[in-house]
Image (cartoon, rainbow, N blue to C red):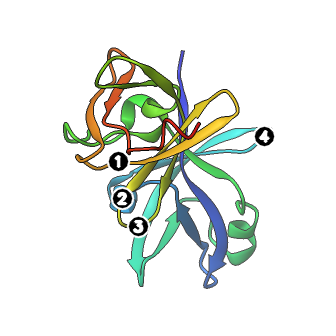
Amino acid sequence: MREDIDIGIIGRTHGIQGYFRVKSLSDFPERFIEMSKLRLKDKNEEKIYDVEDVLIRNNQILIKVKGVDSREDAMNLNGKRIVIDISERIKLSDDTYYINNLIGIYVYSKEGNKIGEVSDIINNGANDILVIKNGNNEMLIPMINQFVDSINIKNREIIITPIEGLIDAH
């Protein structure tokens, strides 16, 4: 069974020749340059388009697909999601993880005490922050070596050195 993930959302048109803007949901916007086909989805349908041109200008992604040749045609695609099969994701280095691989993983202290479960990841610019839930309690742990000792996706566990006083406070 195919598992789709969203990598972009079509936005406003650009010009009169059928180009549209794409809001990238990927950390790798350059991936759009290499795509020969776009799979677009909304609630009711899925359609595949051949890519004619991709431009990246001033951090904007502009795409032109075959059969969409006017501003009006491009407007009809507004809001559609660009999807890929999860198997088509870009391979990451060993110390980098996809957010959906971390959500739901259990977090333990170095001593083996269960602290909670990852419910979200916050990107604050400097580093990512693990949002760990334990019942009604929520803890924020920076994803830096000082606090995160190991991440094991296969065993679905993260080992941390808790921030002093944080665990006791909950």
* Residues at circles 2 and 3 in contact by the CB criterion of under 8 Å: no
Q: Quadrant of the C terminus?
A: top right
Q: Quadrant of the N terminus?
A: top right
Q: Earlier in the sequence, mark 4 or mark 3?
A: 4
Q: Which residue is mark 3?
A: 125
User: Distance between the Cα atoms at labels 4 and 3?
Assistant: 33 Å
**Which residue is more in the foreground, 67 or 135?**
135
Q: Which residue is mark 1?
A: 143
Residue 54 % position (x, y): 41, 68
Q: Secondary structure at mark 2?
A: loop
* Residues at circles 4 and 3 in contact by the CB criterion of under 8 Å: no
Q: Which residue is mark 2?
A: 127
**Which residue is more in the foreground, 81 or 45?**
81
With 11 as the anchor, is 66 left or right in this view?
Answer: left
Q: Amino acid at mark 4?
A: Lys
Q: Amino acid at mark 3?
A: Gly
User: Distance between the Cα atoms at labels 1 and 2?
Assistant: 7 Å
**Which residue is more in the foreground, 97 or 167?**
167
Q: Residues within 10 Å of mark 3 (few under 14, many from 20)?
A: few
Name the residue furthest right. Answer: 44
Q: Earlier in the sequence, mark 2 or mark 4?
A: 4
* Residues at circles 1 and 2 in contact by the CB criterion of under 8 Å: yes
Q: Earlier in the sequence, mark 3 or mark 1?
A: 3
Residue 147 % position (x, y): 30, 43
Where 46 sits versus 157, above or below? below
User: Distance between the Cα atoms at labels 3 and 1?
Assistant: 12 Å
Q: Amino acid at mark 1?
A: Met
Label of residue 43 in the image: 4
Q: Secondary structure at mark 4?
A: loop
Q: Amino acid at mark 2?
A: Asn
Q: Residues within 10 Å of mark 2 (few under 14, many from 20)?
A: few
